[in-house]
Image (cartoon, rainbow, N blue to C red):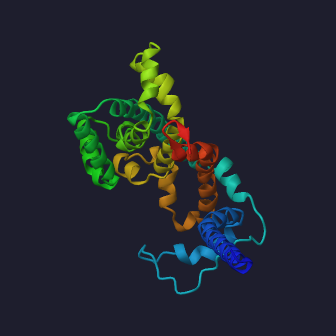
Amino acid sequence: MPRKRVKTKTVIHVARKTLGTLVCAFFAILFLMPIVLTITNSLMSASEIASNYGSIFAVTKSGGRQFVAERVNLKFIPDMVSFSQYITVLFKSPNYLLKFWNSVFLVIPIMVFQLGIASFAAYGFSRYRGRIRGLIFFLYVILMLMPYQVTLVPNYLVSEKLNLLDTYWAIWLPGIFSPFSVYLITKFMNRVPVDIIEASKIDGCNELQTFLRVSLPLSKGIIFSTAILVFIDYWNMVEQPLILLSDAERYPLSVYLSKINSGEISLAFAVATIYMIPTLLVFLYGEEYLVEGITYQGGVKS
């Protein structure tokens, strides 16, 4: 091959790679801008935040929102760094911390028990075949495809009949038995080689031992991946607490963030920053398992 043609192909390859990197960098910066804006604005004083964003949250005399005719000033660098918002949230106003722990108390049981039940169910779906199994799994898929807004009314009616309204059980039970985790873990366990399962049976393992010692360890990646997705999903829930809980003291912090008013703009940035920390920690800790769950191919990582 002529040297000139090789050089041309090399230049084209480098140009494509450079263009792809620039496009990815552009979208990465674009997606990170709201997070950076939230963190930097949480370090501003209340007066500076009000001067920048007060017109957005201003209300008319009748209580409605007014049209914002002027340009909003988006500032990424505060004039003077202030930790007063964090001091107020963490020490002077325990109501925010109470709502934070409400979120933890709502989400952690859902995540733990949903993954536990889904793992057992997924093992059953992956081990046994038949029409009944196929029909049940098909119903799981149909339920998973339904947005949770569709199931809010049935959940409300069932909770009312069971006298669970205004209790955490009204949110826990639908979350624990969600079909989302069952579907993901089942699709993964179906790729576990049958030879490995049969080898454990030859070694004298019963079904429970095969599940605990073979299938579960091999599915560690997808379980952690699903845990990340479930945690993020329920950590940001708003509609379920608003519909199923009437006591505002039981509301998670996500509900407060969805009901920001003009008097709490300055605190909202600090609360939002604190609220992002668990999600970021869960993702950073489970990133390796997330990649492992995606790249796993039937007992051998690709």
- Residue furthest to the bottom in view is 69
Q: In this view, does 124 lie above or below 234?
A: above
Front in this rendered view, residue 274 or 297: 297
Q: Is residue 179 above or below residue 1?
A: above
Quadrant position of residue 117: top left
Q: In this view, does 26 lie above or below 294?
A: below
Front in this rendered view, residue 180 or 169: 180
Q: Position of residue 168 (x, y in %)?
A: 40, 38
Image point 26% across, 44% down: which residue? 138
- Residue furthest to the right in view is 80
Image point 50% across, 53% down: which residue? 254
Q: Where is residue 173 in the image (x, y as percent from the top left)?
A: 36, 37
Quadrant position of residue 73: bottom right
Q: In which quarter of the image is the C terminus?
A: top right
Q: Quadrant of the N terminus?
A: bottom right
With 224 as the anchor, is 88 left or right in this view? right
Residue 17 seen in the figure: yes
Quadrant position of residue 198: top left
- Residue furthest to the front in view is 1
Q: Where is residue 287 in the image (x, y as percent from the top left)?
A: 61, 47
Residue 228 seen in the figure: no
Image point 64% across, 52% down: which residue? 89
Q: Where is residue 167 in the image (x, y as percent from the top left)?
A: 38, 38
Image point 46% across, 27% down: which residue? 196
**How many circles with numbers are drawn on the protein?**
0
